[in-house]
Amino acid sequence: MWEAFVQAATLLKQFDSEVWQIVAVSIQTSLTAVIFGTIIGLPIGGFLATNKFIGSHVLVTLLNSLMNVPTVIVGVCIYLLLSRSGPLGAFGLLFTMKGMIVAQSLITIPLIAAISRQIIADAWSQHSQTLQSFHLTRLLIIKWILWECRFSLVIALLAGFGRAISEVGAVMIVGGNIAHATRTMTTAISLETSKGDLPLALALGIVLMGLVLFINGIANFIKSAAERKYG
């Protein structure tokens, strides 16, 4: 075991090209998925938080349920859509980074939407009537609410990135775990462990844990900064 850790540290120290190529694929796909998740999920969460209509509670329940759907189910659904016989097969996205981005985006969108909806809903219920008493337009009120929630919303986006970069089931199914193309840290760790290549698996695991700890550190820093500023 100790020898495996030493070899893993050596791979990282020597900037092994295979290790960092896998890391680069993971970060690129996860960041892109979070961007799409933010562009789509944040407006959905904001709309559901600030509007009450018939069926809104059903949509909120559905959104919360989608947040907890097993990722392998998402992967199978995307696989069927992107396969040659599927409705989107003509685009040739299966077993590509673009296909993995689609899968990870569909995982992060419900997460970001659900968390941001709760954050905005809490602020909306607390401040909307006060702001309306100043005869502000609805657009200005929403802008103020979003600014008031900016720290918490950033934490929601970081949670989305953490979910995306640690994902294994959907990207394994949609990406195919192809070397030098669609292999991510999580899929490579699973493969190399089964092959008995523990140094490479440990090296990737160290990088993945480092990224997760870094993300959590940023989230805690933002939370602490907000608490100090607003009490």
Image: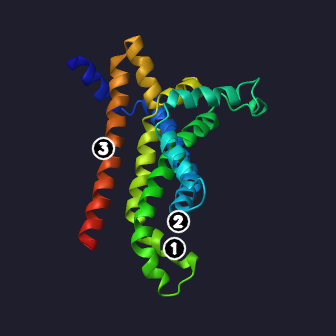
Q: Amino acid at mark 3?
A: Leu
Q: How many marks?
A: 3
Q: Amino acid at mark 2?
A: Thr
Name the residue rendered at 38%, 30% in the picture. 204
Q: Quadrant of the C terminus?
A: bottom left
Residue 219 versus residue 182 in the image, above or below: below
Name the residue rendered at 41%, 43% in the picture. 162
Res 147 → quadrant? bottom left
Name the residue rendered at 42%, 68% in the picture. 125
Residue 115 appearing in the image: yes
Q: Which label was assigned to residue 50?
A: 2
Mark 2 and mark 3: Cα distance apart in space:
33 Å
Q: Which label was assigned to residue 213?
A: 3
Considering the numbered disc 3 on the image, is that residue within a helix, a strand or a loop? helix
Read off the residue under disc 1: 143
Apparent side of residue 11 relative to residue 164 in the rendered image (left or right): left
Q: Amino acid at mark 1?
A: Lys
Q: Nearer the viewer, mark 1 or mark 2?
A: 2
The 10 Å Cα crowd at callout 2, few under 14, some 14 to 19, many 20 or more, is some
Q: How is the image coloured?
A: rainbow
Apparent side of residue 114 relative to residue 36 in the rendered image (left or right): left
Which residue is farthest top? 195
Name the residue rendered at 32%, 33% in the picture. 206
Q: Nearer the viewer, mark 2 or mark 3?
A: 2
Q: Earlier in the sequence, mark 2 or mark 3?
A: 2
Instruction: Give coordinates of residue 18: x percent, y percent.
Output: 46, 28
Which residue is farthest left? 2
Q: Nearer the viewer, residue 159 or 130?
A: 130
Residue 207 versus residue 118 in the image, above or below: above
Marks 2 and 3 in Cβ contact (< 8 Å): no
